Image (spheres, grey):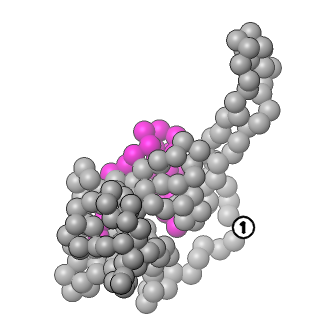
Amino acid sequence: MKKTLYYNFIPTKAEEEECKATATPYKPTWALVELRDVYPPPVFDPLNPWQIKKVLTPAEVGSGRIVLSHNETFHYVFKYWTTDMTHHVVMGQKKKNVLVRDVTDENNPTSYINEDMFFEQVDSDCEYYVLGCEELIRDRRLHAGDEIGLFWDMKTDAFQFKVLSRGP
């Protein structure tokens, strides 16, 4: 099942009456819905599982927040989350604490779970989301230009993180 946002551009009669009474324009509403996906899920390659690859920007390193687009979030994160978890971020409190596993050193992975590890909707129009991981960025001594990989691991219910290459 995939999750998508359903926009309601046509007001109900009651909403139309209310807009007329208050002399305000109608603002379309939206809801998170789950649809049966007609396409099979992406094939998971255990040798290269990094579905999201990013080159870090100075703003991401400075703020400790990795920005993910709407498409990356809906295709590679929310697709594997339950509707309740997704609803919590998109429609509810906008922020959810998550476990992040740093597997850069495959023999000694490090798990991060604290108040600074979260996934959050930043833009109210659902344009982008952020993975807050300031401690991880600091511990790994990441810099702008470093390439990282991320994916949501359903087995551990955690983001898997890896430094793929160091920037200039």
Point 39% across, 46% down: residue: 95
Compared to residue 29, the image places residue 63 above or below, namely: below
Point 57% across, 49% down: residue: 126
Is 27 in front, or is 75? 27
Q: Is residue 20 visible?
A: yes
Q: How many marks?
A: 1
Magenta-tinted stretch: 76-101
Is 139 in front, or is 157? 139
SS assignment at label 1: loop
**The N terminus lies in which quarter of the figure?**
bottom right
Compared to residue 1, the image places residue 142 above or below, namely: below
Compared to residue 39, the image places residue 25 above or below, namely: above
Compared to residue 23, the image places residue 130 above or below, namely: below
**The C terminus lies in which quarter of the figure?**
bottom left
**Label 1 sits on residue:** 38
Instruction: Locate residue 62 relative to residue 23 in the image: left or right.
Output: left
Residue 136 in the image, given as x and y percentages of width and height: 25, 66
Point 40% across, 71% down: residue: 56
